[in-house]
Image (cartoon, rainbow, N blue to C red):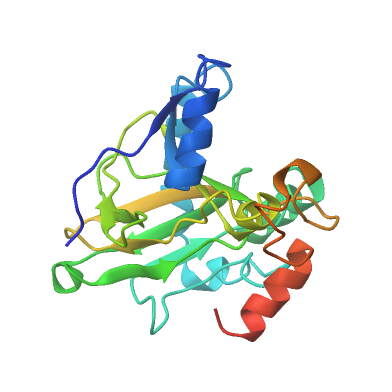
Amino acid sequence: MATKCSIPAIDLQDFPNQLSKLISACEEWGCFRLFNHHEVLPLTLMSEMKAVVRSLYDLPAEIKRQNTDVITGSGYMGPKVNNPVCEALGFHDMSSLHDVDSFCSQLDASPDQRMNKYHFTPETVGSPGVRTHTDSGFLTIIQDDDVAGGLEVMNNSGEFIAVDPSPGTLFVNLGDMATVWSNGRFCNVKHRVQCKEAKIRFSIASFLSGPREVVEPPPELVDDEHPRVYVATTYEEYRKLRFSMKL
């Protein structure tokens, strides 16, 4: 059972006043809600994105399977034994016109991003939609479902905290690369999706992997009291290691 608690909320229009609150959220939680972002991501666009996502998942399975990987895990993933109610579509680089065009041609679709669909039914209530994990990249920006909840994050006491739907906001969580870059200062939050009720749940996630070059902490984060915690690595090297160890 997840505990009820308020996730830190960051006002994008109130910087630099929100900076200390943002740093604290990254250190203590590894995640936060982002609001007042509508100048860069209007509510109308968020609504249109959800409509497109729903239409894509209505496509026949043989068409969805044409959404192939660029790197492991970037293309279509159907329900599996360990994640039986989750289905995902996506592509590798949203800033690449080639990747966008390739995704659209595979599905005969309009441009979009990484997305997940959870087939929650009465029989799956109480079971996991996605098991506990951390994200391998730097951070993830999620437009979660406006109605169906289920996302839970682990706090520093090891308790799961329910992340309730909050229409018109974005949810941001830090991944493993953020922990490496910050020399362990920022939290790579563990999270999961639980089936709470028999509803179809959609989410749209942008996974920011990190820089292509070597990731290591800046000098100001390493001293005698805070020695280097992780070896320098690249995201590609780390991702290969993580998949080879079935993490």
Q: Quadrant of the N terminus?
A: bottom left
Q: Is residue 53 visible?
A: no
User: Which is nearer the eye, 19 or 228?
Assistant: 228
Q: Is residue 192 above or below residue 207?
A: below
Specify whether 50 is left or right of 237.
Answer: left
Which residue is outermost to the right?
213
Q: Is residue 91 above or below residue 31?
A: below
User: Which is nearer the eye, 128 or 20?
Assistant: 20
Residue at image location 66% in from the left, 61% down from the top = 106
User: How many discs mark residues in the rendered view?
Assistant: 0
Residue 7 is situated, as x and y percent measured from the top left of the image, at 33, 39
Specify whether 198 is left or right of 129.
Answer: left
Residue 73 is situated, as x and y percent measured from the top left of the image, at 61, 69
User: Which is nearer the eye, 32 or 243?
Assistant: 32
Residue 112 is situated, as x and y percent measured from the top left of the image, at 59, 44
Residue at image location 38% in from the left, 28% down from the top = 168
Which residue is outermost to the left?
122
Residue at image location 33% in from the left, 71% down from the top = 85
Which residue is outermost to the front?
224
Residue at image location 86% in from the left, 55% down from the top = 213
Residue 3 is situated, as x and y percent measured from the top left of the image, at 19, 52
Specify whether 209 is left or right of 12.
Answer: right
Classify residue 41 by image quadrant. Answer: top right
Specify whether 133 is left or right of 185.
Answer: left
Classify residue 232 by image quadrant. Answer: bottom right
Q: Is residue 243 visible?
A: yes
Q: Quadrant of the C terminus?
A: bottom right
